[in-house]
């Protein structure tokens, strides 16, 4: 029972402590009409609301935060030059607001975040450490920066600085990759040369043609101090700033490697291949989609891939094909020769069959179409028309008397003179090339009797002799009868 009470007491004590802590962090002040800033101590408690930024700076102690609650536009005001306004580390939370002043002066560090600031900034504490100027998610417009501490200036969280005036001195500059520092003045950027790596933090941010020399100068292409430039982390993936063109975008296959010209610009300025980027081509010989990978070099980062096409080439129709007619009409032994395995044939131009040898055999008479097949790199060629002609009309034997006759089938093979071999023509067949079976039928039959090749046995002569003898005998018998009657 005692243990249970002890546990319950501990739980209640923890809850009470949490309530006290929560209550302590929830101290708020009521801002009066016209107030521009609230000051918060290091524990997060609000200690007061103020009508001017100068009053807020006086109230703020070392490490306090000044939260801006209303836009401030006072271009003649200077902060930090009066008693109580300086000699402390200050955080300014712009809170999404805009502050415009003439100048702000500090002895230690300044951390500004979340808004727009337009003024000059100075810190004359030469050689001091733990006194960095940090801009986080700030749009900072200035005509004068003189920050002399060893810690220098740090930009992070997407901060954007525009320097319009001629004064810009610091020991050191560092930037996150999402920040931009625009220099639009006649003197460029300078540091005091006390830190060996003063500009090392922005070596990857200088544009093509500029370089970091030593510790004090950013040079242009002529070796002079660079002016009017932008420090930023440049990447080929920055779609809003990068423009790429490829010419030509398409080719026709010819068996050779294709490398179209690539032009890249960043922010409207054309980059130099070999300095800011290099190109690597792939799949750029055969027909299909080829690629060029554009890789950033030196201070240009990232890479992009662009595509171009290689179209299939056309093929000419086959030539030199030879058609051989049927030996006998209907025998289906026609042929087409001089084919290649890369060809295909059809009888209706719809269904195509591969040519599996150099000769097509056992063909019926008719029209055939032969073309080169489509391949990976070539379209199918136009088709060549090949005509396999009809063979000779089959020979028939008919009897010339009423006596039955028996015809033995011919077992002889057709001689070479009976085969017709012609070259392919792509023209239409003329009427002279066609065979008129009706007009030559009788002639074909007659010729077959004369040239049948059957041996002559002399039967026709014997029949005639017998008829003559019989007629003579009849005439002789008739004469005897007449003679006897007259006698």
Image (cartoon, rainbow, N blue to C red):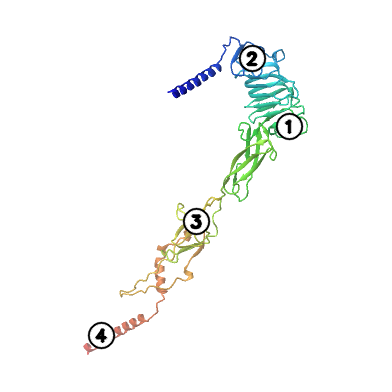
Is label 3 in a helix, a strand or a loop? strand
Q: Nearer the viewer, residue 16 or 414?
A: 16
- Please, is residue 481 above or below residue 440 in the view? below
Q: Where is residue 427 shown, x and y percent of the image? A: 51, 55
Q: Nearer the viewer, residue 454 or 280?
A: 280
* Badge 2 or badge 3: first in the primary sequence: 2
Task: Tell which of 429 and 228 is nearer to you.
Answer: 228
Instruction: Give percent across and percent down for residue 92.
Output: 64, 19
Count of picture labels: 4
The residue where tag 4 is placed is: 478
Q: Position of residue 384 (x, y in %)?
A: 51, 55
Q: Are marks 3 and 1 in contact (CB under 8 Å)?
A: no
Of the numbered discs 3 and 4, the one sitting upstream in the chain is 3
Q: Which mark lies nearer to you, 3 or 4?
A: 3
Give the residue pinned by disc 1. Answer: 197
Q: Among all residues in the image, which is located at the extreme front?
A: 2
Closer mark to the observer between disc 3 and disc 1: 1
Residue 72: image tag: 2
Q: Is residue 458 left or right of residue 75?
A: left
- In the displayed structure image, the side of residue 233 where residue 389 appears, left or right: left
**Label 2, label 3: how many angstroms apart (C-alpha)?**
84 Å
Dot 1 lies on which element?
loop
**Looking at the image, is mark 1 or mark 2 nearer the viewer?**
1
Label 4: element kind:
helix
Whichever of callouts 1 and 2 sits on the residue coming sooner in the sequence is 2
């Amino acid at each position: 029972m005692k243990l249970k009470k002890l546990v319950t007491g501990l739980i209640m004590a923890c809850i009470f402590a949490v309530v006290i802590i929560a209550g302590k962090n929830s101290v708020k002040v009521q801002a009066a009409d016209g107030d521009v800033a609230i000051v918060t101590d290091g524990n997060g408690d609000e200690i007061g609301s103020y009508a001017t930024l100068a009053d807020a700076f006086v109230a703020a102690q070392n490490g306090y935060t000044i939260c801006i609650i209303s836009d401030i536009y006072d271009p003649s005001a200077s902060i930090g030059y009066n008693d109580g306004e300086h000699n402390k580390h200050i955080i300014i939370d712009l809170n999404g607001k805009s502050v415009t002043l003439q100048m702000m002066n500090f002895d230690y560090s300044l951390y500004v975040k979340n808004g727009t600031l337009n003024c000059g900034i100075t810190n004359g504490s030469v050689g001091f450490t733990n006194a960095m100027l940090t801009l986080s998610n700030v749009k900072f417009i200035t005509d004068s920066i003189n920050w002399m501490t060893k810690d220098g200036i740090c930009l992070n969280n997407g901060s954007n600085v525009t320097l319009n005036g001629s004064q810009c001195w610091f020991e050191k500059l560092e930037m996150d990759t999402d920040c931009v520092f625009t220099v639009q003045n006649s003197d460029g950027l300078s540091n005091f040369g006390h830190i060996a790596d003063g500009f090392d933090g922005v070596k990857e941010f200088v544009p093509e043609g500029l370089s970091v020399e030593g510790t004090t100068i950013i040079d242009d292409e002529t070796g002079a101090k660079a002016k009017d430039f932008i420090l930023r982390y440049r990447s080929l993936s920055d779609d809003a700033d990068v423009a790429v063109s490829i010419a030509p975008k398409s080719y026709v296959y010819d068996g050779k490697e294709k490398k179209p010209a690539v032009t890249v610009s960043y922010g409207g300025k054309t980059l130099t291949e070999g300095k800011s980027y290099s190109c690597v081509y792939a799949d750029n010989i055969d027909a299909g989609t080829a690629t060029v990978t554009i890789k950033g070099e030196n201070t240009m980062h990232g890479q992009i891939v662009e595509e171009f096409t290689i179209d299939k080439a056309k093929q000419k129709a086959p030539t030199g094909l030879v058609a051989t007619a049927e030996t006998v009409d209907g025998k289906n032994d026609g042929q087409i020769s001089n084919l290649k395995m890369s060809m295909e044939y059809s009888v209706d131009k719809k269904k195509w069959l591969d040519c599996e040898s150099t000769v097509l055999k056992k063909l019926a008479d008719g029209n055939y179409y032969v073309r080169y097949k489509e391949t990976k790199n070539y379209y199918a060629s136009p088709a060549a028309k090949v005509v396999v002609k009809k063979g000779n009309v089959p020979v028939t034997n008919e009897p010339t008397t009423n006596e039955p006759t028996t015809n033995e089938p011919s077992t002889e093979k057709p001689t070479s003179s009976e085969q017709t071999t012609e070259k392919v023509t792509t023209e239409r067949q003329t009427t002279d090339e066609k065979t008129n079976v009706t007009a030559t039928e009788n002639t074909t039959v007659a010729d077959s009797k004369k040239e049948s090749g059957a041996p002559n046995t002399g039967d026709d002569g014997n029949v005639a002799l017998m008829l003559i003898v019989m007629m003579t005998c009849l005439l002789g018998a008739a004469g005897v009868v007449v003679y006897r009657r007259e006698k």
